[in-house]
Amino acid sequence: MRKQFTFYASFFEAIQELPDGQREQVYDAVCAFALKGESRELSNITQRVAMKLILPNLISSRARALAAQRKTEDLKTSGMNKKENEIEKEIEREIEAEGEGESREAAAFERACLQKDFDIFWEAYPVKLDRQGAWLAWLEQKPQADAVMQALERWKLSTIWQNEGGRFIPQAKKFLTQGYAAQLPPKPAAKSGALPMGATGEMGEAEREAIRRAMQDG
């Protein structure tokens, strides 16, 4: 049984979206496999999907840890005339190599998640120009996909994007780099002759001035 394992932020993100009651079962399944090599049955499909995303990393991490442990035991029992400090250095190198391998796998896992989220964003974006530029911007910013998609839907429904056949829709790279996701689309201008209501629902100074001008014209 292993005494420890690395729990990456990507694991947390994969599990965090699950409802209460399901998250605990997946956490338990992750720990059981990483520490004991035991597979736990998960009945819910969303739990199995989350575990499927995490499992490849756990398998390779556990395999490297077991290999390092076996090599450590071999070094101590092989009868080779090595000093104790040489054995300790060998162990440290094995641990360091394992950590570097896990870091590479974690980076690859994160990139795969970013690619999946970007593909969904690109599919929904109305202007299909400079995909590579948009992808590089997505990689650099690592945005919250849900927030970006919600903002995109607001902009797609806005008057300014719908006017003139979408002439004012920016390219996806500009949408990502110039903060469109954090902005609200501008409200359409009031129609000519209409009196805008004040913020309180009562007539403000602008409304009263419009009435005065209308009376003078009459």
Image (cartoon, rainbow, N blue to C red):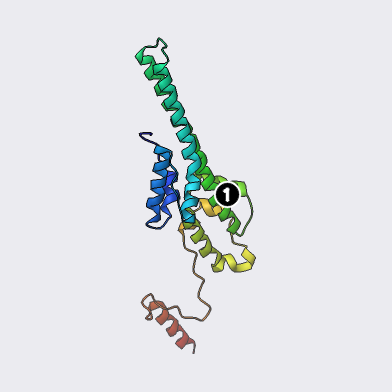
User: Which residue is found at the position 43% from the left and 41% from the top?
Assistant: 38
The answer to whether one can see residue 106 in this image is no
Residue 1, image x and y in percent?
A: 38, 34
Q: Quadrant of residue 87?
A: top left
Farthest bottom residue in view: 218
Residue at left offset 44%, top offset 30%: 66
Q: Horizontal and vertical percent for residue 154?
A: 51, 64
Residue 20 or 141: which is nearer the viewer? Answer: 20
47 on left or right of 133: left
**Mark 1 lies on residue:** 134
Outermost residue, top direction?
81
Question: As displayed, is residue 115 above or below residue 85?
Answer: below
Give the percent coordinates (x, y) of residue 81: 40, 9
* Other-residue count near label 1 (Cα within 10 Å), few / some / many at <14 / 14–19 / ≥20: many
Frontmost residue, 10 versus 63: 63
**Residue ID at (59%, 60%):** 169
Per the image, label 1 sits on a secondary structure element best described as helix
Q: Which amino acid does label 1 sit on?
A: Ala
Q: Which residue is more in the foreground, 185 or 78?
A: 78
Residue 112 can be seen, yes or no: yes
- Residue drawn at the location 42% of the way across and 19% of the way down: 90
56 vs 154: above or below: above
